[in-house]
Image (cartoon, rainbow, N blue to C red):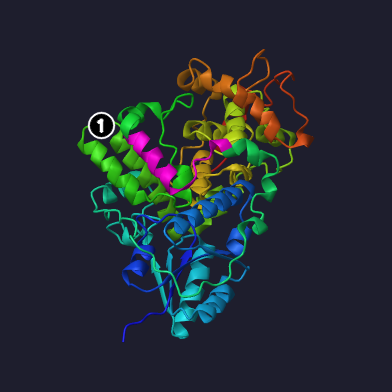
């Protein structure tokens, strides 16, 4: 007699229907499928912008299921295991499927749930999909994990990456649907305040938008991507980090599109593939050395004399885009208006905070976590430690970006700075003015204010940073 009991399908950072291994397996069983999202303690801990963007993603996923004659069930409770046990009992489901997650807290949660439910006779299965290469499947010849990017790239660049799966034609509904929370009751955008209305037009929401973004990138941008990706004033990147962070598109889909472009002779395609693998490398490091999320990855950096006062005047100026360094301030304002920041600009603002202001990288990491709609725990941590010099495969601490010469090189016509900085312009760009509509009232900033002098000039900050570095035994 065949099993006709439902399968619970637990969604997390995999908000799509195509190329979804767990969904494909559940639908392939011919059993009813009950899609589920749980607002547990992991979700509750998210900062303002990531939580708001996740809420939008959940709403879009629910619509996708509705179009397929299915539903997304929502439940809120800190203890995910308690929710799952209750739903298993309520629905008569005998299986739970999900896509793997990789932060230490998520691994602990999922391992506890899998062990507990399997002991209770429930089929609990985890599937890949958030990564192309599982962290434990990529090893050095010595049987260790990779600590430098280039050898990691060489180890995986010719590996087979599974072809993307198509969207299931049918998602069988249960005879009776369980009750669901209303998403609006979760108030996932509460901490965004008035900033949500400013950022919302810049969001490319959901699976269909992600696929369109990829298609446009392959058709019009990837050819010159190896050059244009460094110029923040140009439309020269894929901007897919927003969708990859929530699994609205899979890395496999991006990889195969990039490989086809490379085979067609599009010059920038390999650089795009390397960026996808940089994301994989970040997860590889987080899995094998989870201290990268909160501690100096290079242990000798534990005694480095970082300034750790998040309330310091210089740090407040950095957060507000009022350092007096145009490239830095433009980037910080882009972050506040769009929820994203160009990668070249991220390197500049991170270097300025850690090296010119001698501020602990964790303060910057936390601010990005608060403001980024494409926030990703592994990428954010590795990016900050790379910039600070304390991480694996990091830029040396003595390499200090000059934000003035960086602007001359990567924003030569000033388009990026003019788009985001209003002060000093008779007719500022609309996006520069939007910044003042998004910021908290207590910042008391106005477009008509004078633009500030540098809080720390380049040569002054560089000299202090180098002196601190020379005093260390690295």
Residue 91 x/y as whole percent: 50, 78
Q: Quick one: 94 or 353, which is closer to the camera?
A: 94
User: Is 150 contained in the magenta span?
Assistant: no
The answer to whether residue 390 is seen in the rendering is no
Q: Residue furthest top?
A: 426
> What SS does tag 1 mark?
loop
* Magenta span of residues: 201-218
Quadrant of the image occupied by residue 429: top right
Is 44 located above or below residue 313 in the figure? below
Is 238 located above or below residue 429 in the figure? below
Quadrant of the image occupied by residue 363: top right
**Residue 171 placement, left or right of 415:** left
Residue 271 x/y as whole percent: 32, 36
Residue shown at the point (57%, 33%) measured from the top left? 349
User: Is 216 contained in the magenta span?
Assistant: yes
Residue 5 x/y as whole percent: 41, 79
Residue shown at the point (48%, 56%) measured from the top left? 13
The answer to whether residue 405 is seen in the rendering is yes
**Residue 376 placement, left or right of 271:** right
Pointer 1 local density, CA inside 10 Å: few below 14, some 14–19, many at least 20: some
Is 365 located above or below residue 113 in the figure? above
User: Which residue is identified by label 1?
Assistant: 266
Q: Quadrant of the N terminus?
A: bottom left
Quadrant of the image occupied by residue 371: top right
Residue 21 x/y as whole percent: 35, 62
Is 6 located above or below residue 329 in the figure? below
Residue shown at the point (28%, 51%) measured from the top left? 156
């Amino acid at each position: 007699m065949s099993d006709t009991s439902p399968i619970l399908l637990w969604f997390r950072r995999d908000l799509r229907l195509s190329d979804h291994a767990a969904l494909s397996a559940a639908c392939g069983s011919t059993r009813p499928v009950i899609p589920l999202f749980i607002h547990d303690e992991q979700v509750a801990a998210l900062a303002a912008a990531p939580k708001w963007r996740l809420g939008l993603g959940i709403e879009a996923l629910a619509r996708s299921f509705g179009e397929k004659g299915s539903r997304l069930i929502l439940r809120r409770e800190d203890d995910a295991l308690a929710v799952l046990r209750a739903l298993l009992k309520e629905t008569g489901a005998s299986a739970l499927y999900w896509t793997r997650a990789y932060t230490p807290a998520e691994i602990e949660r999922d391992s506890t749930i899998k062990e507990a439910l399997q002991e209770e006779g429930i089929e609990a299965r985890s599937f890949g999909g958030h990564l192309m290469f599982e962290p434990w499947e990529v090893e050095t010849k010595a049987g260790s994990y990779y600590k430098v990017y280039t050898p990691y790239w060489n180890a995986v660049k010719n590996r087979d990456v599974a072809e993307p799966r198509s969207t299931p034609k049918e998602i069988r509904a249960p005879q009776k649907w369980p009750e669901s929370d209303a998403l609006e009751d979760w108030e996932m955008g509460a901490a965004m305040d008035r900033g949500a209305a400013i950022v919302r037009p810049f969001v490319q929401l959901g699976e269909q938008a992600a696929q369109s973004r990829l298609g446009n990138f392959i058709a019009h941008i990837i050819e010159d991507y190896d050059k244009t990706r460094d110029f923040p004033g140009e439309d020269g990147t894929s901007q897919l980090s927003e969708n990859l962070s929530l699994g609205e598109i899979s890395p496999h889909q991006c990889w195969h599109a990039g490989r086809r472009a490379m085979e067609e002779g599009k010059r920038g395609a390999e650089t795009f593939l390397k960026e996808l693998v940089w994301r994989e490398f970040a997860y590889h490091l987080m899995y094998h050395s989870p201290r990268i999320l909160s501690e100096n990855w290079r242990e000798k950096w534990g005694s480095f004399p970082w300034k750790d006062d998040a309330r310091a005047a210089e740090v407040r100026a950095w957060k507000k885009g009022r350092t007096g360094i145009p490239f830095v301030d433009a980037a910080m304002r882009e972050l506040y208006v769009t929820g994203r920041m160009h990668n070249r600009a991220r390197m500049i603002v991170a270097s300025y905070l850690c090296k010119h202001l001698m501020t602990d990288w964790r303060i910057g990491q936390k601010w990005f976590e608060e403001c980024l709609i494409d926030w990703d725990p592994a990428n954010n941590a590795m990016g900050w430690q790379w910039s600070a010099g304390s991480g694996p495969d990091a830029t040396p601490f003595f390499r200090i970006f000059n934000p003035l010469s960086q602007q001359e090189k990567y924003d030569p016509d000033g388009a990026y700075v003019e788009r985001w900085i209003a002060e000093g312009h008779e007719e500022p760009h609309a996006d520069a003015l939007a910044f003042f509509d998004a910021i908290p009232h207590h910042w008391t900033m106005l477009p008509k204010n004078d633009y500030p002098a540098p809080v720390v000039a380049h040569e002054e900050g560089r000299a202090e940073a180098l002196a601190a570095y020379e005093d260390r035994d690295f």
